[in-house]
Amino acid sequence: MQGMTADEVAARLAVKVDTVYAYVSRGVLRSWKEPQSRTSRFDPGEVEALARRGRPRRASRPPALDFMIQTALTTIGDHDVHYRKQSALALARTATFEEVAQLLWTGRRDVRPAGWSAAPIVLPEVPAARDRLRIAVVMAAAADPFRADLSVPAVVDRAASLIATMTEAVPSTGHSRSARLSLDDGAPPRRGTIAGRLWGRLAGVRATPELVGTLNAALVLLADHELAASTLAARVAASARADPYAVVLAGLGPLSGSLHGGAPLLAAQLLQAAAESGPDAALARALEVHGRVPGFGHPLYPDGDPRARVLLELLRRASPGHAALGVADRVVATVRRRSQLEPTIDLALAALTLVTRMPADAGEVIFAIARTAGWIAHGIEEYGEEPLRFRARAVARS
């Protein structure tokens, strides 16, 4: 069937091309690619039906509530994620996490190294890393008398320090010496990055610039993902003019759920079970316990999560032939045979934590530190909107 191009669909619906791909990500429109082509095609009949009934207010994927929030930050579509119109998949290979955070916050990638210093706080003896992150945010807020300054320069400086503070709050598994980071940008390996500092606290194997580069890629790929549950919560807080620390705390709430930031831990447990008892037994047990297969089947990527593909590719290059990757491959093959589901970035992040012998909760820690960059970016954007614009109406249950 000769389908319509994205430009043609945008013209017919009187929307931007980014909005067309947003419709695809939400299940409002379907797309496909012709053989040997990277161009998305759309069903003319489906497009015409959408044009006649007007802009969708509800997703075709019940029971999700679907509403549009205009953003210049992140768009998902055509098998890629874009941060301010730059491919996140490409940035994962060529940019530091700090550069990507600056891009999200300001539209520019230049980084001021002095701004990435941790706040001088002393944490109580709390063993769980996820709890230490929350406590660090609260203590950093309490130590900042100017946290109510919501101007962009002040928020950006505060955000850089907060991410460094959260990184330093992670309990060290051995030593906290920063490791060097290598990227595919032609520059020599760098030390002192957030990825290198986080490696020194989480990893249980000897660092290589390539492995640290893979951790950096995970941070980049997880920095933002449009309006995920945690990001929406962060924007609601910012709409009420909560300070940046409170915005991050608002995001940390939903992120802790097993269907969000806690998903990498379940995926890691699946891989560990598969290594011990085989993929079939591990998958059967996961379905029995969770009612689903952790780390597979992202609703926005029916053809597979491109972030997972990039992260697994970098991990293979950094640690070729590792046994944990072999287990992941067998699990992926088994899931594809049984359900045709594709791996998500949660599965790739789980594989990274196993290859590098990180603690069980390391996936959530990496996720939280990375997504803090996105929450701050959405907070900055929301500060520029009319306040208190999120007000849902309750309907009496019959």
Image (cartoon, rainbow, N blue to C red):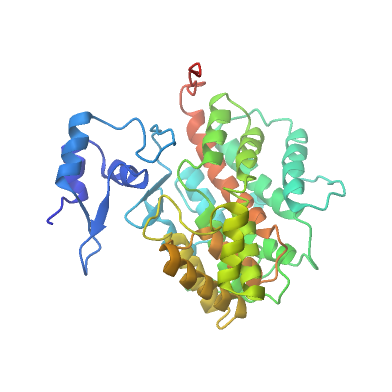
Q: Residue at x 43, y 69 (%)?
A: 337
Quarter of image, res 363: bottom right
Quarter of image, res 198: bottom right
Q: Residue at x 49, y 21 (%)?
A: 392
Q: Residue at x 40, y 61 (%)?
A: 304
Of 2 and 164, the residue lying toward us: 2
Residue 213 visible, this orientation: no
Residue, far right: 125
Q: Is residue 186 left or right of residue 281?
A: left
Whole-percent x and y of residue 116? 65, 51
Q: Is residue 371 left or right of residue 196?
A: left
Q: Above or below — where is 55 with respect to 302?
A: above
Q: Above or below — where is 162 with respect to 146?
A: below
Residue 32 visible, this orientation: yes
Whole-percent x and y of residue 7? 19, 47
Of 93 and 204, the residue lying toward us: 204
Q: Residue at x 75, y 44 (%)?
A: 136
Residue, far left: 2
Of 362 and 270, the residue lying toward us: 270
Whole-percent x and y of residue 346? 55, 58
Q: Is residue 345 left or right of residue 61?
A: right
Q: Is residue 358 left or right of residue 231?
A: right
Quarter of image, res 192: bottom right
The total number of labels drawn is 0
Quadrant containing the N terminus is: bottom left
Whole-percent x and y of residue 56? 30, 32
